[in-house]
Image (cartoon, grey):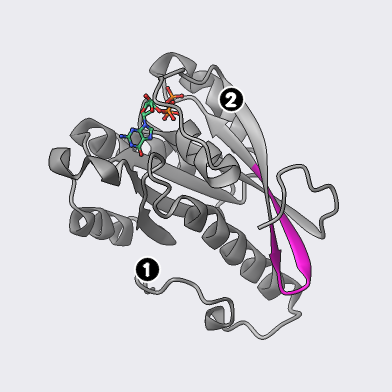
Amino acid sequence: MLPEDYTKFDITFKMIILGHHGVGKTCLTKQAIRNTFDEAYNSTIGFEFVNFNVKLDDKVVKLQIWDTCGQEIYRSLISGFYKNAALAVLVYAIDSKESFTNLDVWLKDIKLQSNPDIKIFLVGNKTDLEDQRVVNFEEAKKYANENDFDYVIETSAKTGFNAKEVFIQAAKVLYLEHLKYTNKANLSSTKYNLNTNAKIDK
Ligand code: GTP
């Protein structure tokens, strides 16, 4: 991983973070990039955007991350954010059934408004709240399989568990797709050591 303000890059991708309000989209992004966590809840207004830079092979991959707001009143604003997104991360919180059942609504928006080739990740955040868990990982994996997600993982923005992993996997998946598209490389995903425990077999 490289610094957030690293200016040289070989390839850049836009990714969007979506999901019910309060599931931890902003915290997860900040934990992955800045190693910080804020207990206070400051709902995102519209969107914020940050960069995640990582080196794969000899290439610097820059993810331009659009962290969106989950509040219903801003949903109409978000529609414009899907444009040119290569990957969407759909987040729910493991202690909130509502955030999980609400995934259908977000997924429908993604399918309606984004590029048909968009990659989609499912992230179950707040694993540190294990004693309040109402969504188990098996249920999430089943949902991800049924809905053709590309990757599923659980995280905690609070402890940092798997926070960076989400973005590293995103960079790997998009970089591999780019190589495939430009036909330049050996396409074995194992080359980049994709986490096969969480990756969905297709
Ligand atoms: P919107 O911008 O309103 O859509 O919210 P969001 O999804 O960006 O959530 P945000 O990151 O602002 O976090 C909401 C609240 O959940 C804050 O009080 C955070 O401290 C808390 N939170 C976020 N991630 C975690 C986590 O992994 N564990 C715990 N225990 N709390 C978390």
Residue lying at 36% horizontally and 45% vertically, measured from the top left: 156
Residue lying at 35% horizontally and 34% vertically, measured from the top left: 105
Of 128 and 85, nearer the camera is 128
In the rendered structure, which amino acid carries the disc numbered 1?
Ile
Q: List x then y, in percent, for residue 81.
A: 61, 32
Query: Which mark sits nearer the N-terminus, 2 or 1?
Result: 2
Q: List x then y, in percent, for residue 10.
A: 82, 60
Q: How far apart are marks 2 and 1 (CA)?
A: 29 Å
Taking the image as four quarters, which one is ligand 1 found in? Answer: top left
Main SS, magenta region, reads strand
The numbered dot on residue 47 is 2
Residue linked to disc 1? 200
The answer to whether residue 51 is above or below residue 198 is above
- Write down the quadrant of residue 180 in the picture: bottom right
Secondary element at image label 1: loop
Q: Residue furthest top?
A: 73
Q: List x then y, in percent, for residue 77.
A: 56, 20
Q: Is residue 49 left or right of residue 116?
A: right
Residue lying at 77% horizontally and 58% vertically, measured from the top left: 11
Residue lying at 54% horizontally and 37% vertically, measured from the top left: 30
Q: Is residue 30 left or right of residue 197?
A: right
What is the span of residues highlighted in magenta in the rendered image?
A: 54-64
Q: List x then y, in percent, for residue 175.
A: 66, 66
- The yes-or-no answer for disc 2 within 8 Å of ligand 1 is no
Question: Is residue 92 in sight in this rendering?
Answer: yes
Q: Does the magenta stretch include residue 55?
A: yes
